[in-house]
Amino acid sequence: MNIDSDVIQADVLVIGFGKGGKAVAAQMGALGRTVVLVERSQHMYGGTCPNVGCVPTKALVHHANKRRPEDSLQDWYERSVGEVQALTSLFRAGNYDGLNGMDTVRVVTGQARFEDPHTVSVQGQDGPLTIRGETILINTGSEPIVPDVPGLQNSSRVVTSTQLIETSTLPPRLGIIGGGYLGLEFASIYRHFGSEVTVFEAAEDILRREDDDVSAAVKAILTEEGITLVTGTQVLEVDDGPAATTIVYEQDGTKHSTDVDAVLVAAGRRPVVDDLNLEAAGVRVSPRGAVEVDEHLRSSRPHIFALGDVNGGPQFTYISLDDSRIVLDQLIGDGTRTTQDRVAVPHTLFITPPLATVGLTETEARAQGHRVTVASQPVAEIIAMPRAYVVEETRGMMKFVIDAVTDEILGAALLSTDAQELINTVALAMRHGITATELRNSVYTHPSSTEAFNDVLGTVIRTDR
C-alpha cells in the first residue's frame, strides 16, 4: 500500500463492507489494484447479510422450526441464538481475512468522512487516517427507521431487528410495528420459538401488492399458527410500565391497547449517509436520503459510485451483488451493463412455508393490457409433488400468470416448501423466454418440488377471452 505524507493512496476506496463493495474490492485486488475498504464497525465485516440480516434470520427460521413441543422455550431459544451468533462470527472473520489477507487490499475500521471529492478522513481503532481514492464506492447500506410515535424512541423494551436477534431472552409477548417482509418474517420466527406475536400494520391488509388469493393464503397460514394480525391500524403511543409495555392503537375509529414484553420496529429502513459529509464530495442525495445514481450506479461525481441499499434501489443482498457487476463493468469491462438489464428479479418472504414471487401479479398483468391465463393449485392437491408430503409441509399454493397469446410466463407466486429455490427456475425461464408449456413439459428429478410445475401449469383456473 502506497503511503505519501501520511495520506494512503488507493486506486479504489470502498466505504462500507457490504456485498457489492467487497465483491468489487476482491476483484480489483486480485487484478493488482491497490484497494482500501473502510468499515465503521468491526461487527459488520461482510455487511448486513452475514451479520444481522439474511444469514442469522434464516438460521433462526431453521432453529425455530426444529423446536419440539417438549423443549423448553427459553432454553431452546437461548441455545439457538448462541449457535447463530457463532455462525455469524465465523462468516465475519472469513470476510475480513479473505480481503485483508490479499497483498493489495487493506481493511480499515472506523468512520469515513469526505474531505473533498477524492479524500476521506477516518477516525477509528487504527487512529486518524487520510485516504485518497481515484475511484470511490459508497456501500454503507441501510438502517432501521424508528417512527415518530410518542414513547417509542425512549422505550426500554423497543428493539430493532438487529438487537432482537442478539438477545438471548425470548420475549413471551412480542409486538411488531410493521407488517411488511421484515415484520412478517420475524412474526413467523418468534411464533415458532413460542412467543405470542401481534403484528400492527397501517395498511388495510398485509401483502397488498400481491393478488388477493395469495395474500389470503399467507394470512390463513399466519393466523392458523396463532399470530395476531392487526391491520388498518395506527399506533398512537408506546408506554413502558414496570412489568410490560403497552401499545396503544386505533382501529376503525376505536382505541385499543395491548401489553407486550418487547416491541420490534419493522417500519422500513433508510440509507446510511448521515456521517459521510457527502456535501464535501459534491455527491447529491434524493429526498429520501439515498445517494442519487444513474443506470451505471455513478453518483453526481462520475468517479464515485453507490452500491446496495444506500443508492435507494431494492434492499436485497443479491441486488447489491449485481450492483458490483455493473460497477466492475464500468471499471474493467466495456461499460454497457446497467440497472435496466435486470428483469424477472425474484423475492422471497421467509415465513414457513416461504412465499417466493417474481414478475407481475394477475392484477398488474391485466392493468398492463395482457390477456391472461391463470394456472393455480393448492400444494396439498399437487399430485406430482410428493416431496411436500415427505417433508410434512403441504400448506400453501402455487400460482402462475401467463400471457394467453404468447404463452410466456408473466409472473408467479409460490407459497410452498422450497419456494425460495423454485422461484429461481421460474425467473430464469422468464429471462430466456421459456414458455409455460415448455416449463410444464420439462423433465425434473423425483421426488422434488420442481416437478410440481408438471401439474400446476396444466391446472388453468381462468383465461381471458
Image (cartoon, rainbow, N blue to C red):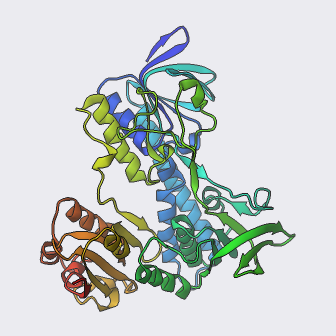
Q: Nearer the viewer, residue 271 or 202?
A: 202
Give coordinates of residue 278: x percent, y percent.
57, 30
Q: In the figure, is residue 2 to the left or right of 322? A: right
Q: Which residue is drawn at 54% across and 67% down?
A: 180
Q: Which residue is drawn at 55% across and 85% down?
A: 223
Give coordinates of residue 62: x percent, y percent.
47, 70
Q: Residue at x 43, y 54 (%)?
A: 316
- The extreme top residue here reads 5
Give coordinates of residue 283: x percent, y percent.
52, 30
As drawn, 118 above or below 96: above
**Whether residue 114 is visible:** no
Q: Which of 361 and 66 is in front in this view?
A: 361
As drawn, 433 above or below 25: below
Quadrant (top left/top right/bottom left/bottom right) for the N terminus: top left
**Whether residue 239 is visible:** yes
Q: Which of 30 and 297 is in front in this view?
A: 297
Q: Quadrant of residue 74?
A: bottom right
Q: In the figure, is residue 273 to the left or right of 431? A: right
Q: Quadrant of residue 268?
A: bottom right
Q: Which residue is drawn at 31% across and 42% down?
A: 338
Q: How many labels does the image show?
A: 0
